[in-house]
Amino acid sequence: GVGRTSEDIEQTMPGVLEVNTDLPIKTDAPVHFGKVRAVYWLTAEDSARLIKEKSYDVAEGSSLAVMVISDRISAFDCVWRAEENLNGVPGKGAALNSIANHWFKLFREKGLADSHILDVPHPFVWIVQKARPVMIEAICRQYITGSMWRDYSKGGREFCGIKIADDLKKDTKLPELLITPSTKGILKGLPGVPEQDDVNITRQNITDNLEAFNFKSVEDVALYEKLLKEGFDCISAALEGMDQIFVDTKFEFGYVTDAAGKDKLIYMDEVGTPDSSRIWDGPAYREGNVLENSKEGFRQVLLKHFPDPDILLNKDRMTERSALAKDNLLPKQVLMDVSKTYLDIAEKITGAPIVLSDDPKSEIIAILREQYGIITE
C-alpha cells in the first residue's frame, strides 16, 4: 500500500512521549538515560521475583531493567524539537522498537544469538537483562556514503586498517562488506587509540586491548564479527525482499549469563532500525536517486536548514551546535515527514500496522502495575 500521509498522522495525532525519565517504576538506583531511551534498574527483590514468575532464561540473581523508549529525535548528538510544541516524532518510539523486535526475533529463528530483551510488555517498553557491554560501536558498511565517502573523497584509502580500492564512486556498493568499528565512549591510555568517543579503530587495536574493550577472548572478537556479518546479511536479505537497500548499520554487543550459568555474547541496544542504519529505497536507487528511509534523511534536512552546516559536522563546535538545537524550533512538517518515513518503513518490515497511542505513559504504568507489580503506589 501507499502507507499513510503525514496529514493522516496529524489527524489522528498520537501522544508524543517526550519525557521518559519520570515513570513511577520501583527502583533504588538513579534512572539512566540516553538521547532516546531511559533505563530503570529494578530492585534485587523485583528482579528475582520476575525471573521466577516469568521464567526468564537468566542466571539467578541477575539484575533486570525496564527500558522505555521516547519519541525524541537526536541527530548530530543533539535532540531537536519543532514548532507547535512538537517535542518529538509521532510514532517514532513504537516504530523503532517494533523494527528491532522483528529483527531480534529473526536472528533467534536463524540461530544467530540472543538479545538483551527478555519481554515486551508494551510497544514502548522492553524488560532487559543487565549486559556487560563491549566498548565498540560495531559498524558494518555495504555501500560507500556518509562519513566514509567524505574521507574517501579527500583521498582516504584506509578505513579501520583496511585498504580499499581506488576507483569507487559515491553511493555505490563496496566490493565486500566492510567492518569499520569505532570506540563506544572514551577509552584512555590505549596506544594508537585517540581518547575520544566514536573514533575509528582497527581490529588490531581491539585484539591488542581485549580487556579495555571488554572482550573475554580473541575468539570473541571473531565471534562479534561473525554475528555482525550474519546479522547484517540477514536484515539485508529481508529488506531486499521489500525492494529496500540495507546500506550500513551500527550494532552493539555485550555479555550476559544464562540460567545455566553460561556467559554468552549477545546483540544489545537496537538493530536494523532507521535510527541505527541507512536504508535506501530500491526503485529510486535504480533510477539514480538516493531516497533515505532512515534518519539520514532528517540529517540532510538539518544540513540544508541552517546557513552554516559546519556547526553540525565539526566536533570542535559542539557548544554552538547545542545552542542551535536548543534555540531553534524546526518547522512542524520536518518532524511529521520523519514520522511518515519511520511508520512506513516499520510497517513494511513488520508487515503489521504500528499501533499508535494517545497516552502511552498511562498505558505503560497500568501494564507494569497490573502484570509486573513494579509501580510504586
Image (cartoon, rainbow, N blue to C red):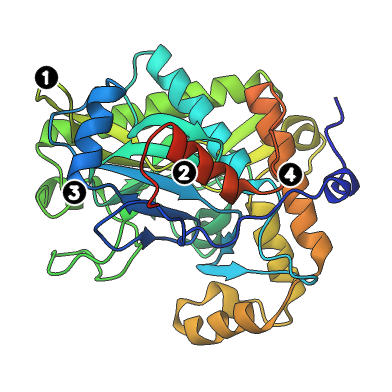
Q: Callout 3, which amino acid?
A: Ile
Residue 118 pos. (x, y %):
35, 29
Q: CA distance from mark 4 to mark 3?
A: 36 Å
Residue 173 pos. (x, y %):
58, 36
In this rendering, the label closer to the viewer, 4 or 2: 4
Mark 4–mark 3 contact, CB under 8 Å? no
Q: CA distance from mark 2 to mark 1?
A: 47 Å
Q: Callout 1, which amino acid?
A: Ala
Q: CA distance from mark 4 to mark 1?
A: 42 Å
**Which comes sooner in the sequence, label 2 or label 3?**
2
Q: Which residue is mark 4?
A: 341
Q: CA distance from mark 4 to mark 2?
A: 34 Å
Quadrant of the drawing holding the N terminus: top right
Q: Which residue is mark 1?
A: 260
Residue 263 pos. (x, y %):
13, 29
Quadrant of res 177: top left
Mark 2–mark 1 contact, CB under 8 Å? no
Looking at the image, residue 363 lies above or below residue 117? below
Quadrant of res 320: bottom right
**Which comes sooner in the sequence, label 4 or label 1?**
1
Count residues near mark 1 (Cα–Cα under 10 Å), then give few for <14, some for 14-19, many for 20+: few
Q: Which secondary structure lies at badge 1?
A: loop
Q: Which secondary structure lies at badge 4?
A: helix
Asked if residue 35 can be seen in this view, the reply is yes
Q: Which mark is residue 211?
A: none
Mark 2–mark 3 contact, CB under 8 Å? no
Q: Which mark is residue 206?
A: 3
